[in-house]
Image: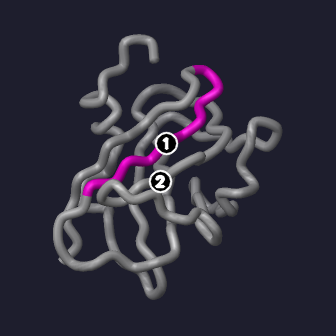
């Protein structure tokens, strides 16, 4: 991962963005490295349990795509400074949660971003 530590990757998370929606939860990750592509979200785990990504979406700017449609052959361009908003079906209980999101980044390979935040 070119010397990127979990702490550095954790800083990509937009603190306080974890929230429940009508029928799921969402959080944001900010691209603080450089413009590039993202080619998939292979896994999201909440409190150590992998969650289903069926119905999950990613929004960058005004563009929203189902997670299942983001792949090596259909990557998503993420400009420097922009945020990825990831929505996952299934609301979370109030309290602190640990989330690990894996992203496929062509220039870096598969990276894991550790998130710890609280839902009120």
Q: Which residues are magenta?
A: 98-107
Q: Which residue is mark 2?
A: 44
- Which residue appears at 29% of the width and 49% of the height? 115
- Which residue appears at 75% of the width and 55% of the height? 69
Where disc 2 sits, the SS reads strand
Determine whether, in the image, residue 9 is placed left or right of residue 52: left
- Which residue appears at 67% of the width and 39% of the height? 39
Tell whether position 114 is magenta: no
**Residue placed most toward the observer, 86 or 81:** 86
Q: Residue furthest top?
A: 2
Pinpoint residue 48: horizontal percent, then vertical percent.
33, 54
Quadrant in the rendering for residue 71: top right
Cα distance, mark 2 to mark 1? 6 Å
Quadrant in the rendering for residue 40: top right
- Mark closer to the chain start, 2 or 1: 2
How crowded is the residue under tag 1: few (<14 C-alpha within 10 Å), some, or many (20+)?
some
Quadrant in the rendering for residue 91: bottom left
Q: Magenta stretch: dominant SS?
A: strand
Q: Residue furthest front?
A: 49
Pinpoint residue 85: horizontal percent, then vertical percent.
49, 58
Quadrant of the snapshot with the N terminus: top left
Pinpoint residue 36: horizontal percent, then vertical percent.
61, 30
Q: Is residue 74 above or below residue 53?
A: above
- Which residue appears at 30% of the width and 29% of the height? 6
Quadrant of the snapshot with the C terminus: bottom left
Q: Which residue is mark 1?
A: 102
How crowded is the residue under tag 2: few (<14 C-alpha within 10 Å), some, or many (20+)?
some
Determine whether, in the image, residue 102 is placed left or right of residue 57: left
Marks 1 and 2: in contact by CB < 8 Å?
Answer: yes
């Amino acid at each position: 991962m070119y010397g990127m530590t979990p702490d550095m990757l954790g800083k990509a998370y937009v603190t306080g963005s974890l929230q429940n929606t009508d029928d799921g939860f969402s959080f944001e990750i900010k691209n603080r490295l450089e413009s590039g592509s993202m080619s998939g979200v292979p896994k999201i785990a909440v409190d150590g349990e992998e969650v289903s990504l069926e119905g999950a979406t990613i929004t960058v700017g005004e563009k929203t795509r189902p997670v299942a449609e983001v792949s090596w052959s259909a990557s998503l361009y993420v400009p420097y400074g922009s945020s990825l908003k990831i929505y996952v079906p299934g609301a979370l209980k109030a309290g602190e949660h640990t989330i690990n999101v894996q992203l496929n980044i062509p220039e870096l390979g598969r990276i894991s971003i550790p998130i710890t935040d609280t839902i009120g």
